[in-house]
Amino acid sequence: MEVETLTNSLQSVFNDIQHCDSKTYSHHLTEIILKIKESNISEDFTPIVYSTVMCRRPQMPSKLILFYKRIFEEVQESESGRNFIMDIYHEVISLVDSKIVRVRRNALILLKLLTSTNGLTEIVENSLLEKIAEKLFDKEKSVRKEALLFLTGFQDKLVHGNTPVMNLFKNLCRFDPSNEVRKVAFQNLKVTSQTYKCIIERCIDVNLSIRTVFFKKYLNKISVRELDYDMKIFLLKRTYSERDFSAVEYLIEVVSEQYDLPTEFINVIEDFYCEKYEKIFKKFINRLFDLNEFKYSFSDVQNNQTVSSFLLFYYYLTYIEENKGKDDLELPNLSEFAEFLYSKAKEAEDGSNIDVVRMLYKIARMYDVFDDVSRKIISNTVYKLLKKGVNEDVVMETVGLLYSIDSDLGDKLFGSLIYKNLESNIDLAMLIAKNLMKNSTKIDAIQSAIISEIVMQNIQHTSSPFIVFYYLALEFNQELLDVLIETRETNLQYLPMLIDLSIVYKSDELINLAISEIKLGLESENEDVIIPTSKLVLSELLKDKSIINKYISHTLRAYYSSASDKTQQYLDIFFHKYFTSEPESLISVFFFVYESLEANLRIFVDQTLYWVESSHQREALQLLYYNICLNMYIYYENIKNIKSYINILNKIQMDERWTPIVTKKILFCCTQLLKKEGNKKYMSEVINKIMMLDDGEPIEPEHLLEVKTDLLLG
């Protein structure tokens, strides 16, 4: 009877502390601490622990957690207090495997309080760590979260033989389906060189708050300089791809702190320059120039003749030109520069230093006026280099440079090179002709001669379709269009060329040719149609809704399964731009794409809701809701998992944007779904939510007919 009285007294105290004032709270705390110090009352206290772990609230009350924490901290001094803690500790361990979710969750909370108080982590045995590590895979996210919090201080420990706890944290960071769990794993992951890659990957997490935490709180904890080159480029690319908030300044701040600028601008070039992402890099380096007083002269380049030094000089000059104007450009003396270029071009004749020469050609294009001597020197370097045969990038720069200096000289020099190489090096001749036509601004004698005398005689050459295309972009010619069409089977760029010409001329013939190719590509699920077709969609020249829907469906399936990095990066931008203004296609195909996907379903749903929510159409979310309900009814027998669609419906926000007419249609649709066998438990709650929005008026006959037609009810 005495035990029961003490237990009841303790229970009364724990009930009271959740509502009492601070004075009473302190009194209760002092009272219990004294009892524990005087004698081990763990047997009387155990029912209180059971009552606590059975707490039905979504979260254990903070006052209660603090009360336990204070008790565990204060009773350490006495032997009975230490015995009390060990008894409660072992009692709580037995509850971690409970079948009741809230018991597992709350037991983990108490265990953390017990072991983190006054350095008691030493009492944690490996068997307990392994037991709690298993809870990282619990089906309930609340349990996984608490298991993570408990294991935070044990990330260097090994469980189940040789698995570091840290690796389990990394796996949850990357793959847990719950945004909350991924965020907890991320925020508690130990920051070391071993976890850098996992941490940096959070910059592409589908969840905005996780991405925000990465940039605001974790990027500055990483030694960016220690990252390998590919990871630096990945970080740069993703920073400038972030659209939901401005992430750029966080990277700029970290780079500014970790590099001694402006002294180490060369190092920044070496670490972050990537030709593939040149436009992004230019924004990045320009922002660093904004923040640093810096000058880089031609003499600096001459003293450090590396590719990075030439790159830095080029970007510095373009920055000055764009921000201050050509008058402030401190270009080297033209004759001195031309001589330097000549010497470097001569060195490059054996194939070395080609990138340096290419940079010098870029810099040369900044000069407005060339004297005869410099013109001759530069044309000689171009001639000699091209005679030796170089890669297309250099050909492109040389052609562009010479035409900017003197178009007549360009015609003469390149015409000569083309004809001299027709027999001995047809590939070089066609490459020069291709870049000459690409840099042309009008059709003149040399352009016509290239077509009639060279291309038509070498129509099977891989460069021929490009030369014809560049000619057509300047001047339409039906005969040449027919020639381009004949290259269809062998020309991998046939569709992009047709689409670009369609946009230039807005010709029905060209548009129809492009659409025919698009249809074939969609039927074969060819990824190559994705990027060019988007241009036709955005230009509003593709008007057929059925083709647009097929295209959007194809791109979404590719985006979430098989698309290359390049295509995914492009679609990031396209989807955001297109769905913001035109969400109808996404709404129309959502159900069918969801049914066809085998992976990334959650990400697809979250991003769809984001795109639709962000669109300019007020009623877009409601129309998505309606469309899902329609397809749930029409395809009910074939749906893989009806409950997954209920979960999606519950994610869609119901608010003042919902129109009464569509609300009534949704309500009617859901009542029809309610009649489906075995569907009552799923649909009742959905209907109750919709009825709270409905005004109670009956649906108009015309709208009833519309929804019945949509449901295929006749």
Image (cartoon, rainbow, N blue to C red):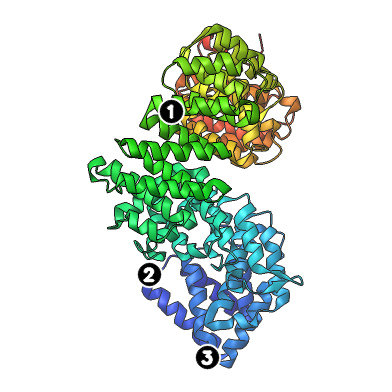
Q: Position of residue 329 (x, y in %)?
A: 27, 46
The label number, if any, that marks residue 479 in the structure image? none
Q: Nearer the viewer, mark 2 or mark 1?
A: 1
Position above or below: 509 against 585: above
| Residue found 62% across the figure and 67% down from its top | 108
Side of 410 relative to 687 (left or right):
left
Q: Nearer the viewer, mark 3 or mark 2?
A: 3
The label number, if any, that marks residue 21 in the structure image? 2
The label number, if any, that marks residue 77 in the structure image? 3
Q: Quadrant of the N terminus?
A: bottom right
Q: Are marks 3 and 2 in contact (CB under 8 Å)?
A: no
Give the structural element (helix, strand or loop) at label 2: loop
**From this viewpoint, is residue 257 visible?**
yes
The label number, if any, that marks residue 410 in the structure image? 1
| Classed neighbour count for the residue bearing mark 3: other residues with Cα under 10 Å, few (<14), some (14–19), many (≥20) | few
Q: Nearer the viewer, residue 53 or 339?
A: 339
In the image as oriented, which residue stretches furthest toward the left? 327
Give the structural element (helix, strand or loop) at label 1: helix
